[in-house]
Amino acid sequence: MTRGFSNPIYLSERIENMIKKSDYLGRGNNGVVYLLPDGKIIKIFNSPKVCKSEYETLVKSRKSEYFPKAYEHGSFYIIRDYVGGVRLDKYLRRNHINRKLTEHIICLYKDFKKLGYRKLDIRCKDLYVQEDYSIKVIDPKNQYDEKVSYPRHLMRGMEKRGRLEEFLHFLKDVDYKLYESWHEKVYIYIAMKKEEDRLKELKKQNELV
């Protein structure tokens, strides 16, 4: 496999040879991911700052079962465990949320707190659902920078796919204190974001007139 990116990124000959022997998995906003012959993945980043931030988050989170293990990094790459499963946003389009998945999401949130994260939130597309309904995190970023006290973006993603009520139903049963803390705030947040989206759309239409 040759390079799947054209950025002016310097990689050592060893890393270039690893990429040539790997399989292309996909491209995101921050870079390109390849599957290595040994089953790990190598992620090539566009920005050394983002690469460093993600690697440091993975290292600090190594005791959590919800994060892949990182093995090596350079200025523009990370080698870590491969994460299989189904991306949560895609999973929710075809599947209901159940109690077990809810329990894992709650445990992930509590792990975020234990790890000292300021941002106690994550996007649906950064979580992968496993066959046993456990979850794995990919692309952790800005967890120590932006302060967010509850998973509002995650629950907004559930709401977009018609699954928020299911999640809150199980949350109420599994951890009533979190339910009491989150359920009103998230609906206020969702309403605010919908109004922002409406105003943006109006502005765009006005600019076209």
Image (cartoon, rainbow, N blue to C red):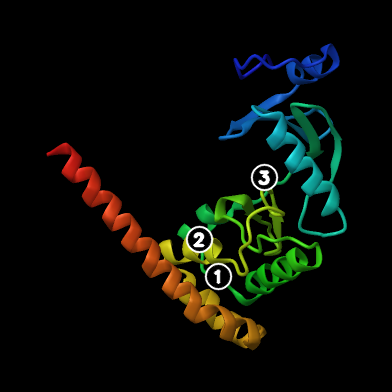
SS for tag 3?
Answer: loop
Asked if residue 114 lies left or right of residue 173, the reply is right
Dot 2 amino acid type: Leu
SS for tag 1?
Answer: loop
Identify the residue at the far top of this view. 13
Which label sits in the foreground, 3 or 1? 3
- Name the residue located 82 percent from the left edge and 60 percent from the top edge: 64
The quarter holding residue 23 reads top right
- Badge 3 crowding class, 10 Å Cα cut-off, few under 14, some 14 to 19, many 20 or more, is some
- Name the residue located 17 percent from the left edge and 44 percent from the top edge: 206
Asked if residue 156 lies left or right of residue 38, the reply is left
Q: Which residue is mark 3?
A: 139
Circle number at residue 11: none
Circle number at residue 92: 2
Asked whether disc 3 touches disc 2, contact meaning CB atoms under 8 Å apart, the reply is no
Tell me which numbered mark, 2 or 1, is placed earlier along the sequence.
Answer: 2
Dot 1 amino acid type: Ile
Asked whether disc 2 touches disc 1, contact meaning CB atoms under 8 Å apart, the reply is yes
Asked whether disc 3 touches disc 1, contact meaning CB atoms under 8 Å apart, the reply is no
The quarter holding residue 1 reads top right
Q: Position of residue 128 (x, y in %)?
A: 64, 53
Distance between the alpha carbons at the discs numbered 3 and 2: 19 Å
Q: Which residue is mark 1?
A: 97
- Name the residue located 63 percent from the left edge and 73 percent from the top edge: 102
